[in-house]
Image: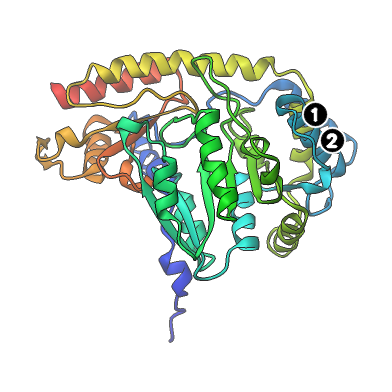
Amino acid sequence: MRMITISKLAASVQPSATLAAGAKARQLRAKGIHVYDYSLGEPDFPTPAHICEAATQAMRDGHTHYTPVNGVPELRAAISRWYQKRYGYEFSPDLVMVSNGAKQSIHNALIATCNPGDEVIIPIPYWVSYSDLVSMTGAVPVYVNTTAASQFKMTPEQFRAAITPRTKMVMMNSPCNPTGTVYTRDELSAIADIVIEKNLILMSDEIYEQLVFDGLEATCMVTLRPELRERTITISGASKGYAMTGWRMGWSIAPENVTKAMNTVQSQETSCPSSISQYALIAALDGSHDCVEEMRREFDLRRQMVCEKLAAIPLITFPKPQGAFYVFFDVSGYFGQTRGGVVIQDSQSFCLAALEQAHVNLVPGIAFGAEGFARMSYATSREQLEGGLRALHSWLVG
């Protein structure tokens, strides 16, 4: 009997490292082991009550059928209003494309704009899915290394040096997953000027825009220069700021021709996103944002506590994150050392040993393109954070 063979594309795609780390933690929990799981980028807060009520009301009102592929007009108008209010950015709701999460929005945008052989510049560290989503189009990821000393920021000089005649796009992410880096407006403006000069596409992933600290503000990159409106694809979503991960609500704002192409792609892939989630998102965008601010303040308290306790562990260093809910810390000082009979050789072996021996679940930096580091999400309770950090300290220091 002939076995089904797997396509070269499917075989080339790597499983999501963050989801894989979460699966390993679940396996240990199934054995009755308490795991301090810091692998997933998922707020632990419940979705705010007024958003849930809007979903219930949508079902009562019969909004349980197919919608337009790009989302109901009321939601696209609400997204447009939100940007006008937050950033002073005015645009037609026709430029909005609502998808099943920001990941699909990114995928749609890449499929709609990139051809095989095109190059897409990605600063390292990068969110785990960027590279594979680019490669799935036949385009080529081109990586730009950054350092902890530069707060993991790509400089204009590095960006310019990475550009070739085949460069089509640059992918920016501020606030950044996995580092928590927040570029300043001036830093992003310098990147934007090169995008315009070199006639590139800018994809700006801004999904953590509501989670910034230290008095900083997130920047919507398309607002930096008038010329960016015709070459920028803005990506965001509801998962992080509104604790709506399971609702699968993401969106893009792009030039008209790109949005139309994305609409065609999505019509063949998933059709419309959930009708019920769309009406819930309208309530999130148009309603009170006190709940968002409460979550942001709690994340800030956790950030301060996590950074203090991590800094107390010898050989671990990191730049303090200023956004999102992650700390990306250097663990290379432990390479070559032995813990529990296991030699720590790289970020993968460090994180696997931490999970198996200390029951602390982290994501290895190599998954984000940055060997020598580990990512810790502090999107969990302070009690869980304190317990896991004690366990990590005990495992490393004794």
Q: What x and y, as percent, mark residue 96?
A: 76, 46
Whether residues under marks 1 and 2 lie with C-beta atoms below 8 angstroms apart, the answer is yes
Is residue 65 visible in the rendered structure shown here?
Answer: yes
The location of residue 247, given as percent across then percent down, is: 66, 39
- The amino acid type of the residue labelled 1 equals Ala
Amino acid at pointer 2:
Ala
Determine if residue 32 is in view. no
* Residue 282 vs residue 65, the one in the foreground: 282
- Residue extending furthest toward the right: 61
Q: Quadrant of residue 107?
A: bottom right
Q: Residue furthest front?
A: 197
Q: Is residue 309 above or below residue 69?
A: above
Residue at image point 58% right, 31% down? 240
Residue that numbered label 1 is attached to: 54
Residue 72 in percent (x, y) is at 84, 45
The residue at the point 26 percent across, 18 percent down is 311
Q: Can you identify the residue that label 2 sits on?
A: 58
In-image side of 165 versus 282 (left or right): left
Counting labels gives 2
Q: CA distance from mark 1 to mark 2?
A: 6 Å
